[in-house]
Image (cartoon, rainbow, N blue to C red):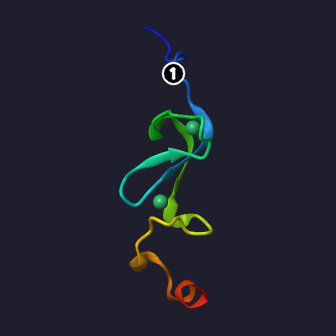
Amino acid sequence: MSENDDIYECQGVSIEHVDGFTECMDFTCDLPHELHSFHVACTELSPLCPCVPEEHVPPALLIAA
Ligand SMILES: [Zn+2]
Ligand SMILES: [Zn+2]
């Protein structure tokens, strides 16, 4: 039995984009999405990520733009 303490987990936030692409808020980090303590969908970001298609944007935001 061996501990998995050799697996490093990023303490940052990994953003999951609409197309499935993921990236850490820390641009120096290249760990995969699963190895992050926090996950967020880019549709939940404020302001919205540019990759979010219009059908996901609430009408109020479109009017404001
Ligand atoms: Zn995005
Ligand atoms: Zn990271």
Residue at image location 60% in from the left, 35% down from the top: 28
Name the amino acid, label 1.
Ile
Can you give x and y, in whole percent of width and height, for residue 30 in the image?
51, 34
Circle 1 crowding by C-alpha within 10 Å: few under 14, some 14–19, many from 20: few
Q: How many marks?
A: 1
Q: Which residue is mark 1?
A: 7
Residue at image location 48% in from the left, 78% down from the top: 57
Left or right? Give the position of 18 relative to 41: left
Q: Is residue 59 above or below residue 37?
A: below
Q: Quadrant of residue 36?
A: top right
In this view, the residue in front, 11 or 24, is 24
What SS does tag 1 mark?
loop
Q: Quadrant of the C terminus?
A: bottom right
Q: Is residue 57 above or below residue 39?
A: below
Q: Quadrant of ligand 2?
A: top right
The residue positioned farthest toward the left in the image shown: 19
